Image: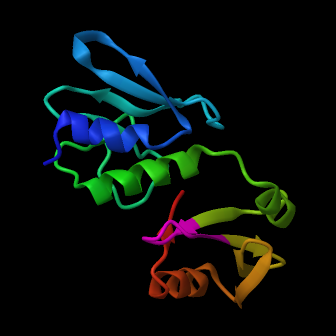
Amino acid sequence: MLNFNEKLSIIESFPQLDRKDVSLGRVNFQFADSVTEKKNIVYHLHPNGNGFVYGGELAGYETDAKGMVNIRDFSAEELRKIIHESIQSLSPRTTEEAAIAGEAIEEKWINEDGQTLMLIEEDDMWNVYAGLNLDGTFNSYGEAAQYLDEEGFRPLT
């Protein structure tokens, strides 16, 4: 288990986050550019090493009623990964994403290296995009999801 200072060092390496000291020596880190009301990415990081990261928009994490994931026993790699994914899930769409998706149904998928792909429903088909480039077209959501899963991606939202 990482101690408070190790976790703090990892969290502070994300320039998008602003530190907010709170009571009892605890620290929050906020993401000012969040597209939702949710601003706290890291909540109540305690000197004993316990704390929470917002994972309400993420798949694959056990969350509490507020969408928070307990990070007490996270490794350095796991902590970096969930913070990166949390920031991504609350970030505004990029110009590329907005240009491709418009008002269509979309999902972001992410792999362990932090690479993201977009899955978009267009004209009764499901298309996978890497940036502006079309990566694949599928007849159903299930086929597209299977492809993404086989390629090591999982839904971000």
Q: Name which residue lies at 27% across and 54% down.
A: 76
Does the image show residue 46? yes
Between residue 115 and residue 97, name the one nearer to us: 115
The color scheme shown is: rainbow
Asked whether residue 137 is drawn in magenta, I would say no
Q: Report the label total.
A: 0
Question: Looking at the figure, which quarter contains the C terminus?
Answer: bottom right
The residue stretch that appears in magenta: 109-118
Q: Is residue 68 visible?
A: no
Q: Position of residue 56 (x, y in %)?
A: 44, 45
- Residues 120 and 6: in front is 6
Left or right placement of residue 38 versus residue 128 in this view: left
Horizontal side of residue 124 vs 55, given as left or right: right
Left or right relative to 156: residue 98: right
Residue 128 vs 114, above or below: the answer is: below
Residue 44 placed where, x, y %?
Answer: 30, 25
Q: Position of residue 101 (x, y in %)?
A: 80, 63
Where, by quadrant of the figure, is residue 21 drawn? top left
User: Splitting the image into 4 quarters, where does residue 24 fall?
Assistant: top left
Please, which residue is most extreme toward the top here? Answer: 23
In the drawing, does residue 54 fall left or right of residue 16?
left
User: In the image, is residue 75 above or below residue 38?
Assistant: below
Asked if residue 81 is positioned above or below residue 150 in the image, the reply reads above
Rendering quarter of residue 23:
top left
Percent x, y for residue 5?
23, 35
The residue positioned 58% from the left and 44% from the top of the image is: 90
Foreground pick, 37 / 141: 37
The residue that appears at 32% across and 45% down in the rendered structure is: 63
Residue at point 22%, 26% (across, down): 46
